[in-house]
Amino acid sequence: MNERSLKIAVADDEVDMRDFLSRILPHLGHEVVAVAETGVELVEKCRETSPDLVITDIEMPEMDGVDAIREICRDRPVPTIVVSAHHEEDCIDRALRQQILAYLVKPIKKSDLQPAIALAMQRYREFQALHQQAADLHQALEDRKLIERAKGILMSRAKLSEPDAFRRLQLLSSEKNLKMVEIARSIVTAEEAFAS
């Protein structure tokens, strides 16, 4: 995702702020794909446009910006910058618990936006990479458990030693041109069929 060509949704209950963001963001190389006045409208427009980034006020009618971001991120995570006239601790605490990666206090200037966007997108990429790494590690652990279970079945049924059972899995994997975990899954499934 290039910071030079992001699709951005903006929301603020103040028309001047909406106009400012709608005017300035294209000058920074971004496309404004949605403009909303309320949190409810922001949620609807984000579902329609799937933006790369959201810039929203916190205090808005119907639903505030933090609650809107929580709702938007139920569909898919979206990095967010909040803009607020307030810098109270409770606002910051609520913002930190969501996908909010930068916090700007009004009045904001054009020079505030580009570094905030760059920072938010960099942090988002880092979070996504960590999330993927955790998912990969979890999958590797689950695969390993399945292979160990299949190895135990081979040791029991074919009276093989542990190294021989592992080699048998490797050989079957090579012969069938399948991943070892797929062979292990077949063995475990077959064992469950015989057991029931």
Image (cartoon, rainbow, N blue to C red):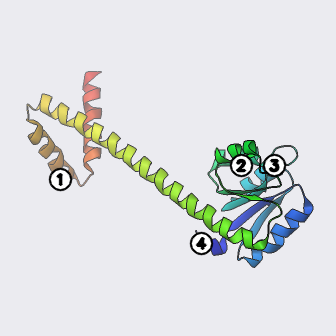
How many residues crowd mark 2 within 10 Å: few (<14), some (14–19), many (20+)? many
Amino acid type at circle 4 is Asn
Q: Dividing the image into 4 quarters, which one contains the N terminus?
A: bottom right
- Residue 7 vertical position relative to residue 79 in the rendered view, above or below: below
Q: Earlier in the sequence, mark 4 or mark 3?
A: 4
Q: Place residue 108 in its image quadrant.
A: bottom right
Q: Is residue 32 visible?
A: yes
The residue that appears at 18% across and 32% down in the rendered structure is 152
Instruction: Indicate which label's residue lies in the foreground, 4 or 1.
Output: 4
Confirm or deny contact between disc 4 and disc 2 (CB under 8 A): no
User: Where, by quadrant of the figure, is residue 19 drawn?
Assistant: bottom right
Say which label, 2 or 3, has the lower sequence index: 3
In percent of width and height, residue 39 lies at: 81, 49
Q: Identify residue for label 1.
A: 175
Q: In this figure, which residue is indicated by the disc labeled 3?
A: 39
Q: Which residue is drawn at the image coordinates 71% and 48% (left, top)?
A: 69
Give the residue at mark 2: 69
Mark on residue 66? none
Q: Amino acid at mark 1?
A: Glu
Q: Secondary structure at mark 1?
A: helix
Q: CA gap, disc 4 to disc 2?
A: 22 Å
Q: Secondary structure at mark 4?
A: loop
Q: Give residue 25's position: percent from left, percent from top.
A: 76, 72
Residue under numbered circle 4: 2
Q: Earlier in the sequence, mark 1 or mark 2?
A: 2
Q: Is residue 122 above or below residue 68?
A: below
- Badge 2 marks a residue whose secondary structure is helix
Tell me which numbered mark, 4 or 1, is placed earlier along the sequence.
Answer: 4
